[in-house]
Amino acid sequence: MKPFLPTVLLLILAAQLLAQTNTPPIDWQRAQSLFQRDQRGEKLNAEEAAYLDRAKKLRQQNQGKQQPAATVPRGEPFKQAALTDVKGTYKGQTGGLYGEGKNEPPAQHLTAAQAAAKQIQPLSAEGKPDAKGKVGLISIGMSNTTQEFSNFVRLANADPAKSDSLVLVDGAQGARDSKMWLFTGEKDDRGQPSPWTVLAERLRNAGVSPAQVQVLWLKQAHAGPASLGEFPAHARKLEEHLQFIVQHAKKTFPNLRIAYLSSRIYAGYANTPLNPEPFAFEGAFSVRWLIEKQINGDAVLNFDASKGEVKAPVLLWGAYLWTNGTEGRSIDDLKWTREDVANDGTHPSPAGQRKIAEVLLKFFKAEPTAKSWFLKPTAAK
């Protein structure tokens, strides 16, 4: 008669192997977002708490093991002139935020943006002019965006020059990269509330109606862009996503006048495939191409009611956040060090979050199309 114990052990091992096989892999961007929420004291539901616990245990198990093949190895930081400083071309693309070495919008587009800015004013919940109403400025994006914008909200709200009518609402969400914002229903593909559902809830909590949202800061990226192919393939896909987001934002918020777009921060220290260089740098071309499309009069991004159905707000570059690591850039003194990012080299550390928040505050206080609604009348002069 054969021993019984080895048979039992084999069955147990087989069951464990089957369970592991049927368990979906950890989405580390989602795990990071859940961890950050937990650290902020937010209450996670049972499924989220279990997911975070599984991620922590898996990470502990992997401590000390060989680095996964998919991980981008640490090496010399990526070096590249900022887009604002590019002379000549980069992979066939000219330098400058708006192309051809120019960092300012064409005169006609700037005039249109200034006209849109003049329409931004305190509105009632129904969208009617109201001196006691609100001007809603929201953010849309992924984990980096919410980390940076939430810090910006604290800085701006403490600034005595900020308009009393202006209400800042962080709509960006961890683990919600550009493709996740394509889910416009109540739920996403995982059965979780869609990003737009979460944004709507945050607006309600802030006492801001959809009709009062008039300005958008959009900073997005595609998680794992290498899977989309080399430049320009991955950047073109991100451009598609950005176009969808601004179009849907205009449908959702009828009084949305201006959308300021930013690309990612420097990722030369990244050690994961989430969004390393050169993808972080090259994402700026997604923003540029989308704005160029509107400047060139494409109907899918029309903002002028006299030219047909309005499909989008006026699009402008927001604060350009990418800088050439510790070498910086010529437009200001922004530099990016290893201490400005978390362990993954991709997300900003608390110091990095503060640094970007300061850049955003400086941008909105100085931007010609923003001063009239961002600042108090006395400070805007």
Image: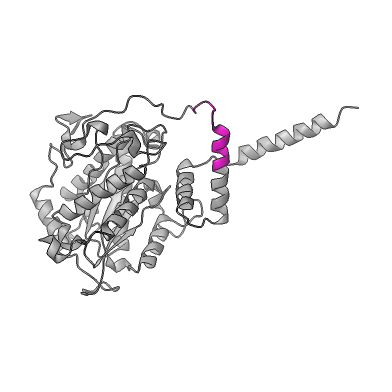
Q: Is residue 299 visible?
A: no
Magenta-span inclusion, residue 64: yes
Query: Where in the figure is residue 282, as x and y percent of width and height?
Result: 28, 36
Q: Visible in this render: residue 344?
A: yes
Q: Relative to residue 10, is residue 43 depicted above or below?
A: below
Q: Is residue 114 left or right of residue 62?
A: left
Q: Where's residue 144, x and y in %? A: 36, 46
Q: Looking at the image, which is closer to me, 178 or 198?
A: 198
Q: Give residue 369's position: percent from left, percent from top.
A: 15, 56
The residue that appears at 46% across and 57% down in the rendered structure is 193
Q: Which residues are magenta?
A: 56-68
Kindly identify the residue that appears in the image at 54 percent across and 42 percent down.
55
Q: Is residue 87 above or below residue 342?
A: above
Q: Nearer the viewer, residue 309 or 115?
A: 115
Taking the magenta stretch, the answer to whether it contains residue 49 is: no
Percent x, y of residue 275: 37, 37
| Image quadrant assignment for residue 137 | bottom left
Residue reaching furthest to the left: 107
Give whichever of 237, 161 is nearer the camera.
161
Left-right relation of 260 to 191: left
Compared with 115, 19 (above or below) is above
